[in-house]
């Protein structure tokens, strides 16, 4: 039987008017197609010699025009950066990426081959990367180093405006107020599974209204002649991370919070130093919190920090006021603690191992045998800022039994085991044609369990797995940073969205007869 769709003339007119009134179209809107730009030389250049340098690729992405052998950008472009050392050499301070640092002014995904394989080095001529014009940028699988800007802001990366997601990367050996600076004009900074280490200046600096998230990362070995050796906090959330071995000549060797609200969830803060210049000015080796700044800690370790002030005025682990969310270990309480004290442990050594490779993408301090932090996190489960269970630690290892305090889970069985669910697969051999084809034999193929949170950061040839460390964003429980060949997901930094089209089928009850 043949069915014919018929629309009453008046109904059709009403439907057309409704669509027009909503500013919609019955035809699907075309999305802006992004370009993929492959870098083919490690030279720092802008010329016409038939290759594509990193600088040329960024200019092509910024201007949507071809530069040398780099194709024209279009929309939120992807730059593939193969293994190699990319050393900047074109001196200057222009804001178009043609000289000095690499200025990014359009939405961009920059993906290297791995933080030990791909290095972008400013070589002391300027900072490495500056993000302008409210661009939304994702950078992954690279080392960013050698920044020395003349204005001393953002030694390696300066988020002047817009947003940045940095993942599976290393930021080190820069000279400035901080290795990564988010200015008052920035909107959001996210650091995932990365290492911010050994910079002259603070590791990360958040100012103004920028919102920052640091998850599954290590900030270590940074030294400043001011306050806040590891992190200068504004509106900041730190989850499943380690703040270790940083120093400040003033207050807050690990974290300095004097503006905005800082939230800590399963963080380990140890071996940080305040008053590193020994002039008895400065305190709070672990954390320093001063009004109007606010700091709240939950399931967190603050222990083994140092204050070099004169005896009688030593405040090694904390100074100022801290709000407890419960289940914290604070070795020496020299600050005012309010809030929920349930499960807090004080006046005890955390019994931590050295900062080292204990598995996973970043370094951690292991809980040693008899550490009081073992199995003393919240018995209802350690959670992030959204109340979502942290079922893995900083390394991506399973939190077993009652979760431990801090970023490391003692005696973990390792990374989560994927759930295997059988579903039909095509036969491996080409079948002989017959009149009746047998159905293919089902095979077991691993899929991610619905209850397992995972993060996949795709590189040029990365294969997604179910065992990557989960990450937490202020508004959602997982983050995916897309590589050049990754399928865009709902939690990647969005580019321009196409105008939705009206599905006429929704109006069938009104227009059929």
Image (cartoon, grey):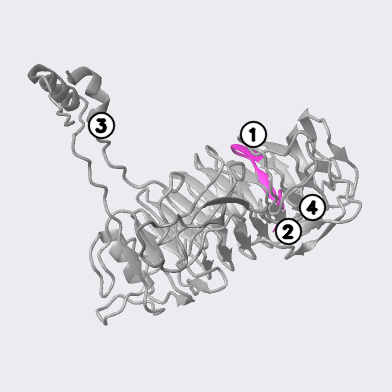
Residue located beneath label 1 in the image: 387
> Dot 3, crowdedness within 10 Å: few (<14), some or many (≥20)?
few
Residue located beneath label 4 in the image: 280
Comparing labels 2 and 3, the label whose residue is closer to the camera: 3
**Label 4 – label 1 distance at C-alpha:** 41 Å
Indicate the position of residue 220 as horizontal and vertical percent values: 68, 60
Task: Give whichever of discs 4 and 1 has the lower sequence position.
Answer: 4
Seen in the picture, residue 343 relative to 132 is either above or below; the reply is above
The stretch in magenta equals: 245-263
Q: Secondary structure at mark 1?
A: loop
Q: Secondary structure at mark 2?
A: strand
For this view, does 412 lie left or right of residue 195? right
- Residue 503 bears which disc, if any? 3
Q: Quadrant of the N terminus?
A: top left
Residue located beneath label 2 in the image: 364
Question: Which residue lies at the image location 56% right of the left edge and 58% below the top edge?
Answer: 465
> Dot 4, crowdedness within 10 Å: few (<14), some or many (≥20)?
some
Q: Quadrant of the C terminus?
A: top left
Indicate the position of residue 127 as horizontal and vertical percent values: 47, 65
């Amino acid at each position: 039987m043949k069915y014919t769709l018929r629309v009453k003339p008046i109904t059709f007119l009403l439907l057309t008017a409704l669509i027009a009134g909503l500013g919609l179209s019955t035809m699907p809107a075309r999305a802006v197609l992004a370009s993929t730009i492959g870098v083919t030389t490690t030279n720092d250049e802008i010329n016409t010699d038939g290759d594509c340098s990193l600088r040329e690729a960024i200019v092509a992405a910024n201007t949507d025009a071809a530069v040398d052998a780099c194709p024209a950008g279009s929309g939120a472009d992807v730059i593939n950066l193969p293994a190699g050392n990319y050393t900047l050499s074109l001196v200057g301070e222009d804001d178009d990426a043609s000289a000095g640092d690499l200025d990014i002014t359009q939405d961009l995904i920059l993906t290297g081959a791995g933080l030990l394989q791909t290095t972008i080095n400013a070589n002391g001529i300027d900072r490495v990367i500056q993000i302008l014009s409210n661009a939304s940028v994702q950078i992954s699988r690279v080392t960013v180093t050698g920044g020395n800007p003349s204005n001393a802001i953002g030694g390696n990366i300066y988020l002047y405006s817009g947003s940045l997601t940095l993942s599976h990367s290393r930021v080190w050996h820069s000279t400035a107020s901080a290795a990564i600076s988010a200015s008052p004009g920035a909107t959001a900074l996210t650091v995932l599974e990365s290492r911010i280490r050994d910079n002259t200046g603070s590791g990360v600096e958040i100012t103004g209204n920028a919102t920052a998230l640091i998850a599954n990362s290590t900030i270590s070995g940074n030294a400043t002649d001011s306050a806040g050796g590891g992190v200068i906090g504004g509106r900041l959330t730190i989850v499943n991370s380690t703040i270790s071995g940083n120093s400040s000549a003033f207050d807050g060797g690990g974290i300095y919070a004097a503006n905005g609200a800082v939230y800590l969830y399963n963080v380990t803060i140890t071996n940080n130093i305040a008053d590193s210049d020994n002039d008895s000015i400065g305190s709070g080796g672990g954390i320093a919190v001063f009004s109007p700044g606010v700091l709240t800690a939950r399931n967190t370790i603050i222990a083994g920090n140092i204050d070099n002030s004169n005896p009688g005025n030593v405040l090694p682990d904390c100074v100022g006021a801290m709000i407890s969310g419960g289940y914290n270990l604070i070795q020496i309480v020299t600050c005012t603690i309010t809030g929920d004290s349930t499960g807090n442990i004080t006046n005890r050594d955390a019994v931590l191992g050295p900062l080292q490779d204990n598995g996973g993408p970043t370094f951690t301090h292991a809980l040693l045998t008899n550490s009081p932090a073992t199995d003393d996190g919240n018995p209802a489960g350690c959670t992030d800022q959204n109340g979502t269970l942290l079922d893995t630690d900083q390394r991506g290892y399973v939190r077993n039994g009652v979760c431990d305090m801090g970023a490391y889970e003692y005696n973990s069985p390792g990374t989560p085991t994927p759930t295997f669910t059988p579903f039909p697969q095509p036969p491996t051999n080409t079948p002989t044609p017959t009149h009746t084809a047998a159905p293919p034999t089902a095979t077991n193929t691993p899929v991610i369990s619905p209850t397992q949170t995972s993060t996949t950061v795709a590189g040029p040839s990365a294969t997604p797995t179910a065992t990557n460390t989960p990450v937490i964003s202020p508004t959602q429980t997982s983050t995916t940073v897309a590589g050049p060949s990754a399928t865009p997901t709902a939690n990647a930094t969005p580019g321009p969205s196409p105008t939705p089209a009206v599905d006429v089928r929704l109006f069938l009850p009104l227009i059929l007869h």
